[in-house]
């Protein structure tokens, strides 16, 4: 049996999946409707919306299958998420990658599998819409197109969930999305005894930018600031626009001592942007920096409150 490889952007893929806050939620008609359509259109016993978690595949919709999840290491969906086209296995018993797979030789006795990888923007897929049969099958070209169409319907439903956790203007997480990701990351830090640090940013003299240059220019300043965050901080860091001109970055496996030079580099990057952009104003910020203490910070909001207080203290001195 060949276990599925790990995508090169696994951390980003996993963060995108977690930001949906969909894992282990109740069934929803909007997804079940699509898997019912898939079963009927392809005349197969099983159709799934499968989301590939860190060590399992979990089924948001499982028409025709009693299981709620299976290990990722034996999942055919784990292979499917590595590409962008339909992953097709006409007869798993004749495929050396899967012939001795427990899902093939035991229940549910998969012979035929076809999975469309579900993407949210660029990068690796977070899961699949897949159809399964206990008999070998060969799909025609028009069948592949129909499965893709159904898969795009699932992607649109997932995108609607993503919008609830994303700031529309900057593309960063919003406060809800940040809280979901940060809670998971902080729990991980506690379990693995890793440090974490939270940086809270507030733009200085942002109101005069809106008053003098207009709100469209103010929006451009917010987008530019978000872009500099993406440039300087790591992909593994969690950054968000909490609202208005307030932004936050959670750095895991980083102490306050590790983070302070990063903040200075960020300030230099913003200053360099001001020089090049020459918009008639400078983007500047105050910040508060707090190291995570799991005994003191029993929630994400408690950590945010400490960093917010330090930021306002720094803002008063600027």
Image (cartoon, rainbow, N blue to C red):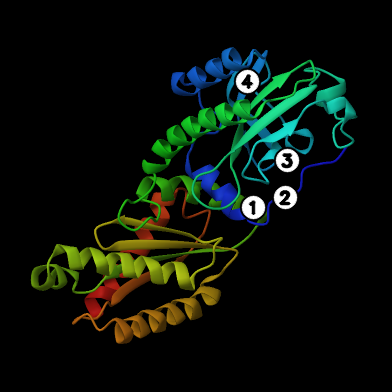
Q: Which residue is mark 1?
A: 10
Q: Alpha-carbon neighbours of circle 3 within 10 Å: few (<14), some, or many (≥20)?
A: many
Q: Which residue is mark 3?
A: 79
Q: Mark 4 or mark 2, which has the lower sequence index? A: 2
Closer to the camera, 252 or 191?
Answer: 252
Question: Residue 47, which numbered label?
Answer: 4
Identify the residue at the far left of this view: 211
The kind of secondary structure element at disc 1 is helix
Q: CA distance from mark 3 to mark 4?
A: 17 Å
The kind of secondary structure element at disc 2 is loop
- Give the percent coordinates (x, y) of residue 301: 39, 50
Q: Mark 1 or mark 4, which has the lower sequence index? A: 1
Residue at 58% across, 41% down:
126
From the image, which quarter does the N terminus lie in?
Answer: top right
- Give the percent coordinates (x, y) of residue 72: 73, 37
Q: Nearer the viewer, mark 3 or mark 1?
A: 3
């Amino acid at each position: 049996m060949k276990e599925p490889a790990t995508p090169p952007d696994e951390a980003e893929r996993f963060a995108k999946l977690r930001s949906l806050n969909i894992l282990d939620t109740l069934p929803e008609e909007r997804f079940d409707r699509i898997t019912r359509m898939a079963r009927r259109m392809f005349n197969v016993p099983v159709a799934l919306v499968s989301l590939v978690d860190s060590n399992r595949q979990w089924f948001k919709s499982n028409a025709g299958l009693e299981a709620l999840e299976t290990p990722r290491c034996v999942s055919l969906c784990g292979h499917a998420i590595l590409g962008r086209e339909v992953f097709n296995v006409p007869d798993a018993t004749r495929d050396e990658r899967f012939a001795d797979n427990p899902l093939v030789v035991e229940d549910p006795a998969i012979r035929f599998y076809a999975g469309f990888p579900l993407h949210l923007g660029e990068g690796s897929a977070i899961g699949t819409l897949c159809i399964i049969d206990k008999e070998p099958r060969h799909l025609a070209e028009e069948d592949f197109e129909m499965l893709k169409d159904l898969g795009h319907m699932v992607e649109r439903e997932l995108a609607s969930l993503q919008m609830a956790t994303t700031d529309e203007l900057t593309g960063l997480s919003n406060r809800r999305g940040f809280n979901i990701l940060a809670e998971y990351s902080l729990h991980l830090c506690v379990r693995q005894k890793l440090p974490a640090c939270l940086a809270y940013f507030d733009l200085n003299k942002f109101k005069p930018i809106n008053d003098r240059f207009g709100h469209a220019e103010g929006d451009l300043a917010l987008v530019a600031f978000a872009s500099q965050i993406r440039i300087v901080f790591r992909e593994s860091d969690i950054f968000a626009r909490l609202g208005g001109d307030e932004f936050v970055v959670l750095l895991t496996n980083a102490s306050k001592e590790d983070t302070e030079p990063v903040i200075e580099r960020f300030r230099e990057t913003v200053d360099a942007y001001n020089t090049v952009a020459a918009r008639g104003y400078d983007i500047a910020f105050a910040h508060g920096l707090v190291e995570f203490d799991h005994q003191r910070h029993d929630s994400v909001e408690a950590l945010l409150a400490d960093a917010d207080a330090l930021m306002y203290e720094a803002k008063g001195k600027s």
